[in-house]
Structures are given as C-alpha cells and as structure tokens.
Amino acid sequence: MPQGSEQALLASPGEAMVRAGERGQGWARTNMGSVYDDQPNAHQRFMEKLDACIRNHDREIEKMCNFHHQGFVDAITELLKVRADAEKLKVQVTDTNRRLQDAGKEVIAQTEEIIRCRVQQRNITTVVEKLQLCLPVLEMYSKLKEQMNVKR
C-alpha cells in the first residue's frame, strides 16, 4: 500500500509515526517535530500510542518466546528420552556382543576339532590306500612263506 493512502487510514500523525518507526522508515525521524507543533497534547498521545505499541510488541515477543520455549523444553525432554533409550540400546548391544563372542569361542573350538578329525580321516584314508597298494606284495610274501614251509 502506498504511503499516502496508508496515512489516510491512520487515526493520527502520532500513530503514523509509530507505524513508520516500526518499519524503520526515515521520515518518522524527520517529521517528529510536526507532531509536537500541529496538535495540542500530540506529545502525550504519541507517547501513549508508543507505550501501547511497546506493550503489544512485548506481548508478541513473550508469546513467541513462550511458544519456542515450550518447543525447546519438548526437544530437551525428547533428547533425554532418546539418551535413555540409547543407553539401554548400548547395554543390549554390549550384552549381545558378549554372548556372540562366547558362542563364537565354542564354534571356534568345534571347528578346530572338526579340522583335526578331517586331518586324521585324511591320514587314515592315505594309510588304507598305501596298504591296498602293498596288499599284493604281502599276499605274495605269504604264499612264498607258505611254500617254503611246505618244502622244508
């Protein structure tokens, strides 16, 4: 809205200056003297409007602070809950890790036993294969010994 039409809607030049001051417009500073010169009790009305504006802003600031403060308190409360949950989770993870490590030790021991048994099985298989290779020779030796005993 242009400044001229806005001024027409305002009740007094003091209110216009307050609004302009709220917006940080420079003409409020330069025309401050005209408020005092143009109307009787203009200073008093200007100060009353300024005080009312300040009270209004204070209420708005307080509302905003209260709103954000409650959000801050809620966030801190939620963080404390998350922290407690994180501590519980940490204890659970530590306990699960300990149990997993214990179970892992047993698995390692059983795996080492399986490896030892497989090596032993492989050795037995190798011995059986070697003995089967020697069997014909042993059979021939047995027959030879038998024939030598018969011819004696």
Image: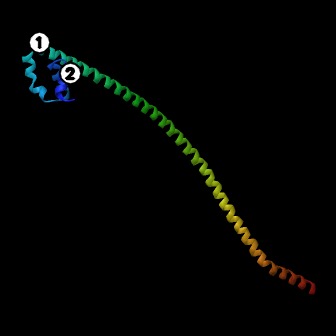
Q: How is the image coloured?
A: rainbow
The quadrant where residue 57 appears: top left
- Mark 1 or 2, nearer chain start: 2
Q: Is residue 10 left or right of residue 73?
A: left
The quadrant where residue 22 appears: top left
State whether residue 74 is above or below residue 137.
above
Q: Label 1 belongs to which residue?
A: 41
Quadrant occupied by the N terminus: top left
| Residue 66 rendering spot, x and y as whole percentages | 34, 24
Q: CA distance from mark 1 to mark 2?
A: 21 Å
| Residue 15 image label | none
State whether residue 149 is above or below residue 77.
below
Q: Label 2 belongs to which residue?
A: 9
Which amino acid is tagged 2? Leu
Q: Residue furthest bottom?
A: 151
Residue 152 visible within the image:
no
Which amino acid is tagged 1? Asn
Residue at the spot x=58%, y=47% of the render? Answer: 100
Residue at the spot x=69%, y=61% of the render? Answer: 117
Residue at the spot x=20%, y=21% of the render? Answer: 9
User: Closer to the camera: disc 1 or disc 2?
Assistant: 2
In the structure shown, which secondary structural element does the residue marked by tag 1 occupy?
loop
